[in-house]
Image (cartoon, rainbow, N blue to C red):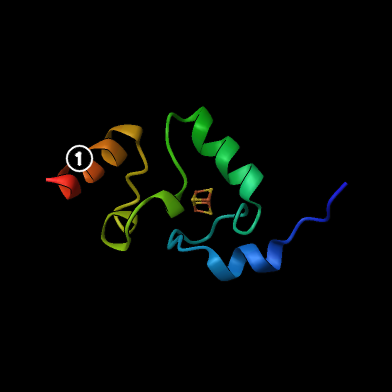
Amino acid sequence: MRECKTGDNMAKCNCTYEPCPRKGLCCECIKYHREAGELPACYFPPEIERTNDRSVEKFIATYQKRRR
Ligand code: SF4
């Protein structure tokens, strides 16, 4: 089994929500948001990530706007 690379994950994490016990634990982060019908912070650009709206609807709306 591979070792969890929490330190590497933390270096790349763009999440601004404090405090969150799942930071750096990407598998737990994805599971948490998936069960809530959401996506993790790293799927969103900074200005949207800061709103803490991690819904699938917001993700789709964000990227539909960017394609126009
Ligand atoms: S995206 Fe969600 S679960 Fe992941 S670190 Fe941020 S607040 Fe925590």
Question: What residue is shown at x 35% (from left), y 50% (from top)?
Answer: 52
Label 1: few (<14), some or many (≥20) within 10 Å? few
Residue 61's spot in the image, x, y percent? 21, 39
Question: What residue is shown at x 18% (from left), y 50% (from top)?
Answer: 66
Left or right: 47 with respect to 29? left
Residue 49's spot in the image, x, y percent? 34, 55
The amino acid type found where label 1 is placed reads: Gln
Residue 47 falls in image quadrant = bottom left
Above-or-below relation of 4 to 28: below
Q: Residue furthest front?
A: 67
Residue 46's spot in the image, x, y percent? 32, 62
Mark 1 near ligand 1 (CB under 8 Å)? no
- Name the residue carrying label 1: 64
Question: What residue is shown at x 64% (from left), y 43% (from top)?
Answer: 28
Residue 58 falls in image quadrant = top left
Left or right: 20 with respect to 15? right
Above-or-below relation of 20 to 8: above
Left or right: 8 with respect to 13? right
Left or right: 32 with respect to 51? right
Q: Nearer the viewer, residue 63 or 13?
A: 63
Question: What residue is shown at x 25% (from left), y 44% (from top)?
Answer: 63
